[in-house]
């Protein structure tokens, strides 16, 4: 009833655990973007169907994945460091069976972990649209991509786990250094702040439309890194997650700092000013 799509790049370490967690599916696809380690070999050894594609953007890669020849009408989209819980595995078939044709996707809670601690309070965006009716979804935005769904989106109760720091903080920072460069480009071009509507941010019916508008407004705030740290720590309550919550908040604040520094550098470069 449910196919699985896993997107990979050099995921030899994390892929086996992900494949073990989705062994219940009769149709597992791995879309690999040119790994130089044993990712493809690990996937094939576990019985997954491997497709290799040159990476040309996060949204484009996910959209290419959605075009694969799935055996089932629904697909669960995962990264290699994510694991559906047994509760989610049990809930998904029942939810699909009860869903009318108007339902095209399900939103699922993602639980991020650092140092073995679930970042229950620190995590800013706990819900992600990951269970999709094939042919009814499309990804947009090149970084921190957004899924557009043709049809109704419902929410499941169970969660999937995200081992965001499984490769260590150095790897996390390296990845977010790249993300911050792309975010800075969107911000400098004005694309990231397009649609910064307070009405949309508060009252849009679609959850992801609200999130996009909220992020656009956030990008226009002064002292964003400090605001984000204080918001995560004391409004969201990251401090209640202990040392892991404090570290997570600090890392995300630094990520915002990188975006802003790179944005200013881009604008100075385009204006012909010295760097």
Image (cartoon, grey):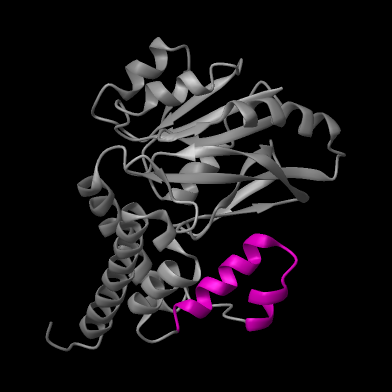
Q: Residue at x 62, y 25 (%)?
A: 3
- Give above or below for 265 relative to 245: below
Q: Quadrant of the C terminus?
A: bottom left
- Magenta residues span 198-220
Give coordinates of residue 16: x percent, y percent: 38, 21
Judge whether residue 117 can be spotted in this image.
yes
Q: Is residue 143 visible?
A: no
Q: Quadrant of residue 77?
A: top right
Q: Which quarter of the figure has residue 268?
A: bottom left
* Residue nearer the viewer, 174 or 94: 94
What residue is shown at x 31% (from left), y 71% (from top)? 259
At 63% from the left and 61% from the top, the residue drawn is 208
Q: Looking at the picture, how far across and down is residue 204, in whole percent?
A: 72, 70
Residue 206 magenta-highlighted: yes
Q: Position of residue 47 (x, y in %)?
A: 47, 11
For the stretch drawn in magenta, the main secondary structure is helix
Whether residue 207 is in magenta: the answer is yes
Camera-side residue of 86 and 155: 86
Q: Is residue 226 above or below residue 124?
A: below
Quarter of the image with the N terminus in it: top right
Instruction: Give the residue drawn at x 69%, y 39%.
Output: 135
Say whether residue 171 is left or right of residue 140: left
Residue 218, image x, y percentages = 48, 77
Q: Is residue 64 above or below residue 74?
A: below
């Amino acid at each position: 009833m449910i196919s699985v799509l896993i997107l990979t790049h050099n995921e030899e370490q994390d892929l086996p655990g992900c494949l073990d967690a989705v062994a219940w599916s009769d149709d597992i696809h791995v879309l690999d973007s040119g790994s130089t380690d044993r990712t493809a070999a690990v996937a094939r050894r576990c019985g997954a169907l491997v497709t290799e594609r040159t990476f040309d953007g996060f949204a484009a890669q996910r959209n290419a994945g959605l075009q694969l020849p799935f055996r089932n009408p629904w697909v669960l989209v995962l990264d290699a460091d994510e694991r559906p819980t047994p509760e989610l595995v049990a809930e998904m078939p029942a939810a699909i069976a009860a869903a009318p044709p108007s339902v095209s996707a399900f939103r699922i809670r993602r639980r991020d972990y650092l140092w073995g601690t679930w970042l229950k309070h620190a995590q800013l965006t706990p819900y992600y649209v990951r269970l999709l009716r094939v042919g009814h979804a499309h990804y947009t935005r090149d970084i921190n991509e957004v899924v557009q769904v043709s049809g109704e989106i419902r929410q499941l109760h169970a969660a999937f786990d995200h081992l965001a720091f499984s490769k260590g903080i150095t790897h996390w920072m390296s990845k977010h250094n790249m993300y911050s460069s792309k975010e800075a480009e969107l911000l400098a071009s004005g694309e990231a702040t397009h649609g910064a509507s307070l009405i949309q941010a508060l009252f849009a019916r679609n959850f992801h439309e609200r999130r996009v508008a909220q992020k656009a407004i956030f990008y226009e705030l002064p002292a964003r890194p400090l605001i984000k740290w204080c918001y995560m720590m004391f409004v969201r309550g990251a401090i209640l997650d202990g040392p892991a919550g404090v570290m997570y908040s600090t890392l995300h604040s630094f990520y915002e700092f990188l975006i802003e520094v790179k944005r200013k550098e881009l604008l100075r470069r385009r204006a012909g000013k010295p760097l």
